[in-house]
Amino acid sequence: MKTSVVLATSVLLLGAGPAVATAGTGVPDCASLDQLRIPAAALSLPTTGGRVTAAVPTTSVVSGQTVEHCQVDADLYPVDRSAPAIKMRISLPHTWNHKAMMFGGGGYSGTIPALTGNVPFSTAVAPLARGYAVFASDSGHQQKPGTVPSLDGSFGVNDEALRNFAAGDALKKTHDAGLFLIRRAYGRGPAGSFFAGGSTGGREALIVAQRWPRAFDGVISGYPAWNNLAEVLYLGHLTQVLARPGAFPGPEKQTLVYDSVITACDGLDGVTDRVVSNQRGCHFDPRVLRCPDGADTGPTCLSDAQIGAVTAMSTPFRWPYRVASGEKQYPGFPFLSGADMRTPFLGFGTTAPANPMPATSGYGMQYWDQWVKHFLTRDPAFNSLDLDPARPGKWLGRISELSTIQDRNNADLRPFARAGGKLVLVHGNADELVSHRSTNDYYERVRDLLGPEKTRDFLRYYLVPGANHANFGTPAFTAGWDSLTALEQWVASGQSPRNPVVTDLAHNRTRPLCEYPAWPRYRSGDPDSAASFTCVTA
């Protein structure tokens, strides 16, 4: 396995010092791990080393099971003394399965994900309860107290912190420190290493597969914000549109649009279930909701300005300039084919964008505001509404520079495939925060580079109709699938996922999990059973 190469290198880097536990057996001695120094030589990217700050015997209930583990916190120190440390945590179970799982973050990160959590779209047994040594970090910076969760971009003013997060440097530093601590705890490294994350974590999953193709045997990438800067420019465009006088559709009009789309397109897959599976057949025109004379006359219609805004939110945005990453556009959200823009926190909010940016505006608008202030201009007082991403003026050079950091995911997974890695990619087609159309584009780029047959040797991409971003709020389809077991089997035996089924956890129904570009069409029988559907492409 490719992890053996990493571990062989780690043995040379660890230097002298006894292992805490004997050859993969026994209980890790937390007291012996406390204040342990992590040498800089154990990490393959530049740091000044690190140190364990706490090691505590812990008992947690995970997936209904009581799990005893040693919870270890550590700081990985930067080269730039003005940069924040990377804060990481690892849970070392008493009944180790000889595998490691690293979790990705979300939004602008800044906090360590819960190690008792699960992989994207899953309610199966979580990795820690399976016996994995589970670890993660805050992506190299700490969220400021009082800021909105996952929406503090203030760390972007520091170059090292920016690269740790946006380029993914913190991922490899955390990976290497995790292996170091696992070896010290158990006397050996893991026999298999896995990575899982959604949204920002999904982007991070693709980063590790591309930049460090031998670091992980299996990767799960959920709803990945892989072309981060491209999406930011698109969100900036929508911020400009929605801030225009009278353009913002309030909650009642958002409901009007969503219900109208469902009424028009729900039955195109053969069954009426408030899930739009056949998006390619859905051609809803918001102009059918136009108010008389295009003026805003109430909640039962859309003004011309609101029709323009809804259309902009649902169609591609192309910028008329070159950036170094080569990205040229972002494909828009599926609001006119089944996505619900009303989702609390992750949707488009209840108030229009303004300066200062309201906490009641959309998540994407607040994300753009933070990016402009701290990544682009590095001026916290800058009014993000004053910057038009279609005409950025003097900021074009900085945008292009940032594109080489944030959008370095060029979809070349050939080294990962050659190393024997396996990748499960999954996205909901009603995602209101990261467009599945962008993931379609990523998959097609991979397929164009490797060819269809070689792509299927290591990658499966599944679209879940009706599923939104991270099962947040009350989606039309609350997706649940045991992707980790499927990935484990693929890595261990070469048996790829076969006829997977996804469950709607809120409505007690199942659907076939179709490989892109296929979608589930109803044939006959119980409409709540996956057996009543077939995957089709037309």
Image: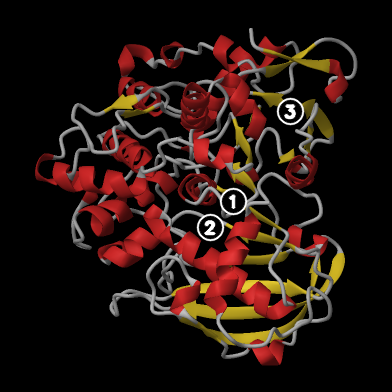
Q: Is residue 10 left or right of residue 66?
A: left
Asked whether the beta carbons under mark 2 and mark 3 sit within 8 Å of each other, the answer is: no
- Looking at this view, name the residue that lies furthest to the right: 525
Depth order, front residue of 30/180? 180
As drawn, 108 above or below 538:
below
- Looking at this view, name the residue that lies furthest to the top: 538
Asked whether the beta carbons under mark 1 and mark 2 sit within 8 Å of each other, the answer is: yes
Give the residue type that dot 2 points to.
Answer: Gly
Q: Residue 513 — which label?
A: 3
On the image, the x and y values in percent for residue 152 come to 39, 62
Q: Residues within 10 Å of mark 1 (few under 14, many from 20)?
A: many
Say which quadrant the C terminus sits in. Answer: top right
Where residue 56 sits, quadrant-wise, is bottom right
Name the residue that disc number 2 marks: 105
Give the residue type that dot 1 points to.
Answer: Gly
Sequence-first tag of 2 and 3: 2
